[in-house]
Amino acid sequence: MSSALHPCLTCGACCATFRVSFYWTEAEPAAGGVVPVELTDKLNDFRAVMKGTNRPQPRCIALEGELGSFTPCRIYAQRPTPCREFLMALDDPELDSACDRAREKHGLPRLKPMPEVNA
C-alpha cells in the first residue's frame, strides 16, 4: 500500500484558478444545502460563489496550505457541486483538461498516470 498523498492534496491549482459558482440552495440549510453560507457570496438571484473565487486572481477561501505543497480543502465533505464534479487530469488523460490548464498556470507539471498495482 502506498503512503503517497492523493495528487489533489498536493496541488490546489483548480481552487486558485476558477470561479466556483453554484445554485444558491447548496448554501441554504433550509433547502438542504450543506456548503457553509458564511464562506459564500451572492453572485446573482440564482447563484452563489465561493468567497475568493470571483476575482481576477481567484483563491477559494476553503483552500488551505500552499499551492503545489499540502493543500487540503477545509470543507471537502461540504464542497459545492462544481468542486465535486471537477475532473482531475488522471480521470481522463486523453483530455486537455481544466486540471492540466490550472496546474500549468501555477507552474505545476501535468499529472502522469500512475502504474496500476496488482494485489
Image (spheres, helix red, strand yellow):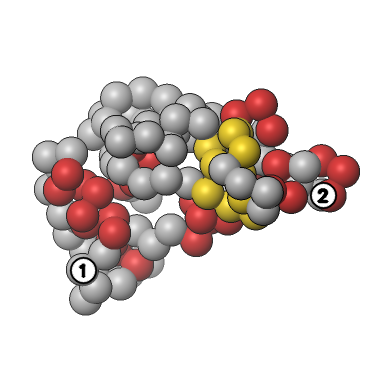
The residue indicated by pointer 2 is 32
How many numbered marks are there?
Answer: 2
Identify which residue is drawn at 43% across, 58% down: 86
Cα–Cα span, label 1 and label 2: 35 Å
Identify which residue is drawn at 84% across, 49% down: 31
Q: Can you give x and y, in whole percent of width and height, for residue 88 in the image? A: 34, 58
* Secondary structure category for the residue under label 1: loop
The residue indicated by pointer 1 is 96
Is residue 39 shown above or below 5?
above
- Check residue 65 in the rendering and tell me which mark sits there, or answer none: none
Is residue 70 shown above or below 112?
above
Identify which residue is drawn at 39% across, 62% down: 87
Residue furthest out toward the front = 45
Q: Dot 1: few (<14), some (14–19), or many (≥20) neighbours within 10 Å? A: few
Q: Are marks 1 and 2 in contact (CB under 8 Å)?
A: no
* Secondary structure category for the residue under label 2: loop
Lateral position of residue 23 relative to residue 50, left or right: right
Quarter of the image holding residue 60? top left
**Which amino acid does the dot numbered 2 rest on?**
Gly
Residue 20 visible somewhere in the drawing: yes
Identify which residue is drawn at 50% across, 61% down: 85
Residue furthest out toward the bottom = 94
Chain-order first, disc 1 or disc 2:
2
